[in-house]
Amino acid sequence: MKVSIDTDRCRGHGICLGECPEVFELNDDGYAEAGPDVPPEFEKAVRSAASACPERAIVVS
């Protein structure tokens, strides 16, 4: 599974970090970042974070 953040949509709510801190982090400006490859044990949490994002900024493929 791959994950990315649409930086034009992210508003820094941090919900993703709360859902899966192993994959998501906030940069110095307070916006989400994520590594592209998601370990299998975190796939469910990443999908949950994507669903919870109010801006729909998390792209899962």
Image (spheres, rainbow, N blue to C red):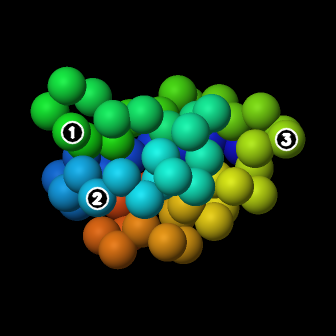
Residue with the most extreme right position: 41
Residue at the (34%, 42%) spot, across then down: 32
Q: In front of the other: label 3 or label 2? A: 2
Can residue 61 be seen from the camera position used here?
A: no
Distance from label 1 to label 3 (Cα)? Answer: 26 Å
What's the residue type where badge 2 is placed? His
Q: Position of residue 61 (x, y in %)?
A: 62, 52
Q: Position of residue 7 (x, y in %)?
A: 24, 46
Identify residue for label 2.
13
Identify residue for label 1.
30
Residue at the (84%, 40%) spot, across then down: 40
Can residue 54 be seen from the camera position used here?
A: yes
Identify residue for label 3.
41
Is 18 situated above or below 37? below
Frontmost residue, 55 versus 13: 13
Distance from label 3 to label 2 (Cα)? Answer: 24 Å
Frontmost residue, 56 versus 42: 42
10 Å crowding of disc 1: few (<14), some (14-19), many (20+): few
Chain-order first, disc 3 or disc 2: 2
